[in-house]
Amino acid sequence: MHRRPFLRLASRATVLAAVVATTFGISTTAQAQDVIRIGAPLALTGGLADEGKKQQIAYDMWLKRVNAAGGIQVGAKKMKVEIISYDYQTDPKSAQQIAERLITQDKVDFMTAPFGSGHTKIVAGVAERYGVPLMASVASSESVYDQGYKYLFGTLAPNGGIVQNMATMFTKQIPGVKKIAILGREDVFPRAMAAEMKKAAEGVGLEVVYNELYPVGTLDHASSLLKIKAAAPQWIFVTGYTQDLILARKQMSDLKLSAPIVTMITGPAYREFIDGLGKLADGVTSASWWHHSLTYKSDDVFGSTAAFYKEFVEREKKDPDYVHASAAAALVVLQKAIEKAGTLDKAKVRDALAATDTLTFYGPVKFGANGMNGGRALPIVQVQAGKVIPLFPEAIKAGTLAAITTP
């Protein structure tokens, strides 16, 4: 008998009592010592459901390949893998409770982190307390990694390099950009990106004419956008998650607010941003940690960027984004560490992760002393005619920056 993927949604107050885990990968009759158990708190409902489902897809792609090959080599034997997942409903308190449950009741060997820097930071505290290696695939804010944690490892590169390259490139390619307005979501990652942009903008001589944060759950950006319009910037920079950014872009159009450069982090990196905006997405710039036009070849279960891309498109009928790739890469790296350690001993696998220096289908992964992947030239993109066009780095460049001329 096999566990079928199934999820019963519970109220946040009763999530641990009523929610049923999504468990996939192996037979329920297998003994715990015969399998590697990975816990995965996922936001499958709530405000980050789109993002959480992307992680789930990537985990399933990796899992099927690994188990089809007989599992992970642990010393002298191969062990199948089981992923146990709970929907924490985009609620940080539930994420913390589920992490506790996965470790203390489900007895997972390792864990993956939820979407986003804020929720990753919460779960990382739990994993650290129990000494469980935690793979974070969508947390790029250094404030997550400066807590002295020894068991946290992230596949995304730091935020800073993205906006620094953007500031230098955009101001050179579009003359006359003197003023920038920054609007950021009051949340760990978006707040960090807004702060990094302010620093980068001032570093290239731009005047920051507006710099404010909006609360999580904001349903109307009009007040902020009218203030930005009055300041007449040549560059508008907005941070947040997909639905925040779609709303902000629509309201910009309604208010006839535009600028030669409109950047939304990380809007255009996601297909649903473009689908939700149609022509209004055109011209919006962003940055990403990965793009499917990269050409990495590797010895992992995917083998290359091209192979990952091909399988994803055949399965999902659309292009993958950096969340899919980074989530799959996090498990690729964990697999490599387990194989290197030759054991499921958590401390030894943790040491193997700390020593990681490898090339994956997603790109190079080498963790620093804080557990964060090293920086590299990350893609800068722009939506042009409904498509995401890489502008940087040169190796994947497919177009040049185009100024926006209409609201």
Image (tube, grey):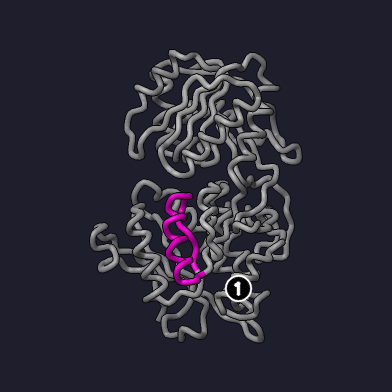
- For disc 1, the neighbor class at 10 Å (few under 14, some 14 to 19, many from 20) is many
- Mark 1: which amino acid? Val
In front of the other: 390 or 135: 135
Q: Residue at x 29, y 66 (%)?
A: 16
User: Label 1 belongs to which residue?
Assistant: 349
Q: Residue at x 36, y 46 (%)?
A: 47
Give percent across and percent down for residue 108.
46, 74
Give percent across and percent down for residue 25.
49, 73
Q: Residue at x 38, y 55 (%)?
A: 44
User: What secondary structure do most residues of the magenta stretch adopt?
Assistant: helix
Q: Looking at the image, can residue 25 be seen?
A: no
Position of residue 215 relative to residue 295, above or below, is: above
Quadrant for the N terminus in the image: bottom left
Q: Residue at x 50, y 19 (%)?
A: 209
Q: How many marks?
A: 1
Position of residue 366 relative to residue 46, above or below, is: below
Which residue is the extreme one toward the right?
A: 395
Magenta stretch contains residue 400: no
Q: Secondary structure at mark 1?
A: helix
Magenta stretch contains residue 127: yes
In front of the other: 50 or 143: 143
Position of residue 42 relative to residue 22, above or below, is: above
In front of the other: 158 or 44: 158
Q: Give the side of residue 26 with respect to residue 89, left or right.
A: right
Q: Give the side of residue 370 with respect to residue 271, left or right.
A: right
Give percent across and percent down for residue 309.
63, 52
The image quadrant that residue 305 belongs to is bottom right
* Magenta region: 111-132
Q: Give the side of residue 13 with respect to residue 147, left or right.
A: left
Give percent across and percent down for residue 107.
43, 77
Q: Looking at the image, can residue 127 be seen?
A: yes
